[in-house]
Image (tube, rainbow, N blue to C red):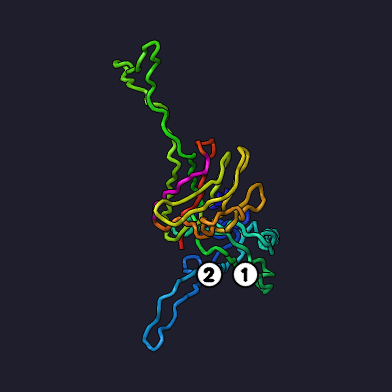
């Protein structure tokens, strides 16, 4: 599980290696973590007037730099510093895919997806003595920071309640009013499904959920009532099928195959479907089926922070 190596403030977990406090890699400064990422500012100057028209602010990638020094934890570890250095090199090579980067500061643990974009280990005199200086840079295509724990909620398609059992008219059995001594009362039947999910994003940045739709279902539809947020797909899913919508990546896949082309004309771009910051969102699951099926919809998300 991501972050399981971290036990205290000032620690970083990267690809299974613990950095920072209580490790041989003594951190000096982490830059960019609590800063706002660089912004694209769409503000335009007013023509022949003072001031400007406020434009949209869009966050760019977040770049994190970490300066440290390799310091063996005990004098007996001095002979092992080449092994520590080799372990660091092994997890800071060039990779195309992003990996989880977890940082804990001030009692708060957050996760970002990142890639190593720079590594500096100068071969100076400290290097030959076994105390090399270290410099790492991570670039995160998604500039938001997230809770490590993912949240999830699942719903079925809407279905009514079973209601009361009125007994058998031919035998005049009537209603069973329960046992007064046991306070059993009437049996109103099993509750139905509303087809709705409640998702709370407690962070200060909008969060993009992942939506998983399991069949059997025809033309599944995901929407936020009272808004224009709607995702609808002209597709029929079997009971063994799962359609996955990644709203941050903007992808729609079924068994690893692209199904983005099944989006209907009413459907908004997947990237526009977000859970607003510091808000609770109701998400509705519907379909074109004449009667409720055994289909389900799961929404996964993390609280997001700048």
Query: Residue most toward the left?
Result: 180
Mainly helix, strand or loop, the magenta region?
Answer: strand
Could you say where residue 134 lies in the image, as x and y percent from the top left? 62, 68
Whether residue 104 sits left or right of residue 14 in the image: it is left
Which secondary structure lies at badge 2? Answer: loop
Could you say where residue 65 lies in the image, as x and y percent from the top left? 56, 69
**Residue name at image x 60 percent, y 42 percent:** 237
As measured in the structure, the alpha-carbon distance from the residue carrying label 1 to the one carrying label 2 is 29 Å
Could you say where residue 49 lies in the image, as x and y percent from the top left? 37, 87
Please name the residue that numbered disc 1 is placed on: 133
Visible residue check, residue 65 = yes
Asked if residue 127 lies in the magenta stretch, the reply is no
Please name the residue that numbered disc 2 is placed on: 60
Magenta-highlighted residues: 279-289
Circle 1 Cα neighbour tier, 10 Å, few/some/many (<14 / 14–19 / ≥20): many
Between 187 and 93, which is closer to the camera in this rendering? Answer: 187
Could you tell me how many numbered marks the image carries? 2
Query: Residue most toward the bottom?
Result: 48
Asked if residue 281 lies in the magenta stretch, the reply is yes
């Amino acid at each position: 599980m991501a972050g399981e190596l971290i036990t205290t403030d000032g620690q970083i977990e990267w690809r299974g290696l613990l950095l920072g406090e209580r490790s041989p890699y003594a951190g000096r400064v982490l830059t960019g973590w609590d800063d706002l990422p660089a912004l694209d500012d769409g503000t335009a100057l007013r023509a022949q007037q003072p001031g400007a028209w406020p434009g949209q602010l869009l966050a760019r990638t977040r770049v994190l730099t970490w300066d440290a020094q390799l310091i063996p934890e005990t004098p007996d570890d001095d002979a092992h510093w080449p092994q520590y250095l080799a372990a660091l090199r092994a997890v800071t090579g060039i990779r195309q895919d992003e990996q989880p980067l977890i940082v804990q500061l001030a009692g708060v643990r957050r996760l970002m997806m990142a890639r190593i974009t720079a590594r500096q280990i100068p071969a100076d005199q400290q290097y030959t003595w076994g105390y090399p200086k270290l410099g790492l840079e991570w670039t995160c295509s998604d500039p938001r920071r997230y809770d490590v724990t993912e949240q999830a909620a699942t719903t079925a398609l809407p279905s009514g309640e079973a209601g009361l059992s009125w007994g058998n008219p031919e035998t005049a059995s009537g209603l069973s009013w329960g046992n007064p001594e046991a306070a059993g009362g009437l049996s109103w039947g099993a509750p139905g499904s509303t087809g709705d999910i409640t998702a709370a994003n407690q962070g200060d940045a909008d969060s993009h959920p992942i939506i998983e739709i399991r069949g059997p279902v025809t033309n599944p539809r995901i929407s936020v009532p009272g808004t224009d947020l709607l995702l609808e797909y002209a597709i029929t899913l079997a009971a063994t099928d799962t359609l996955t919508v990644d709203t941050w990546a903007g992808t729609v896949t079924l068994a690893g195959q692209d199904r983005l082309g099944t989006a209907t004309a009413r459907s908004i771009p997947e990237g526009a479907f977000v859970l607003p910051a510091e808000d609770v969102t109701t998400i509705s699951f519907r379909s074109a089926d004449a009667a409720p099926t055994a289909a389900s919809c799961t929404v996964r998300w993390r609280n997001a922070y700048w």
